[in-house]
Image: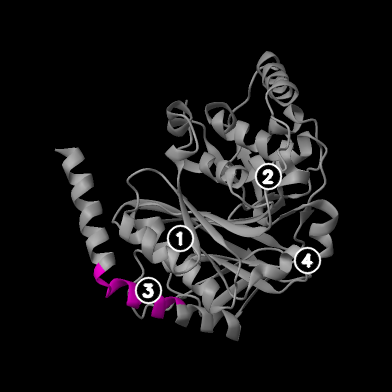
Amino acid sequence: MQVEEEFGSTGIRYTSYQPTREEINLLKKSWQTFVDRDIPKYPGTFNGRGIVTCGGGMRYFTCAWVSINILRKKGCELPIELWYFDGEINSEIIEKLGYLNVVCKNVKNYSTDSLTDSLTGYALKPYAILNSSFKDVLFLDADNVCVRDPSYLFDSAEFEETGAIFWPDFWKTDINNPVWEIVDSSDFDEYEQESGQVLVNKEKSWNSLHLTLYFNLQRQQYYKFLLGDKDTFKFSWKALRKKYFMVQREVGYCGYSGVENQLYSSGVAMVQHDHRGFILFIHTNMAKWDIVKCGEYLWKKTKYFKTSAKIKKFIKRNVKLVNGSDGVVFDIDGDVLIENSDCDVQMTEISCHQVLEELRQSDFYLRFILDAYMSRMRREV
């Protein structure tokens, strides 16, 4: 079933999916039964703090390599786990990542064959968090870059109190979306969640994380009214009446070139802040590192709604994407502020390009690309 998503000019995300009363009751009863019967007890075998990411295949390994190297350059010493599907990276990649204190985990070694097939796409994110060795987890999308060492987040009062920190998206969920009734919540004015970064204590969040995974495994139903995985976290916490802290500083865009009707004119990355309001994450969800050209600096400008903004407009633009296909990008307008990105952001982008150029010049990356290409083409023959 094709479900139409509509992002309104006032910042409301709508869905065309309108389930019947019977369907809503069934969905609600099903997740409640899952929580009551199918969630194992918290095992108490997890230890310490760490970062978890998913980064297999040429596109997402390239992003993960840049992100991980920047973390180390910023002084982050937290252990890192990179989760991947069988065949997505090779032994040489695993060895190189090992030098960066990264443990690579093949999903097939931790799940059954039937579950592995169901973990494709976004469902791997909550699964990797649940099955990582860490008790406290900072999950980062592979294309998310930290402008400073994020380790201090684990010591924040907000994390100590709730055991979960989430980050906002631009949109708010329409009050008529069926999810509100399914989880029995009415926080209509809260922003949707952007799940490129998630911080959780697994002991406090155990049941909520399992429910998040459940929602993603049941994606044929839940993705009809939720946008991928991102709000499956937030609404799992709401369903179980668990506290979390949502970062209060609104998300921004960076990457404006000022050229109309071009991909880069609407921003290439989301700018996310820490609990104190300082920039911490640049989520490069549009121009990922596998397609960025050497010397192509895209983070020069940052665009926000003004703190006192009375007019907030959301614009959808049709563009030609870098692969030649038609695509859609979003922009913000109204009471906005466009300014030069701060020094930390610009210096971080310079470091990213240095890492990317070194990677592209390395023999192991060229071998990896050739192997990935041949593997894909041989499957297509």
Location of mark 4 (residue): 155
For numbered disc 3, what is the local secondary structure? Answer: helix
Q: Earlier in the sequence, mark 2 or mark 3?
A: 2
**Would residue 315 be counted in the magenta stretch?**
no
Which residue is drawn at the image coordinates 51% and 74% (left, top)?
70
Q: Residue 289 appears in which quarter of the rendering? A: bottom left
Residue type at mark 1: give it.
Met
Q: Earlier in the sequence, mark 1 or mark 4?
A: 4
Residue ranking furthest to the top: 22
Which residue is drawn at the image coordinates 45% and 26% (left, top)?
114
Q: Which of the two marks, 4 or 3, is nearer to us in this view? A: 4
Location of mark 2 (residue): 45
Magenta region: 352-363
For numbered disc 4, what is the local secondary structure? Answer: helix
- Give coordinates of residue 241: x percent, y percent: 83, 38
Which mark identifies residue 76? none
Q: Earlier in the sequence, mark 4 or mark 3?
A: 4
For numbered disc 2, what is the local secondary structure? Answer: loop
Q: Is residue 227 above or below residue 327?
A: above
Packing grade of label 2 (10 A; few <14, some 14-19, many >=20) is few
Left or right side of 263 for 364 = left
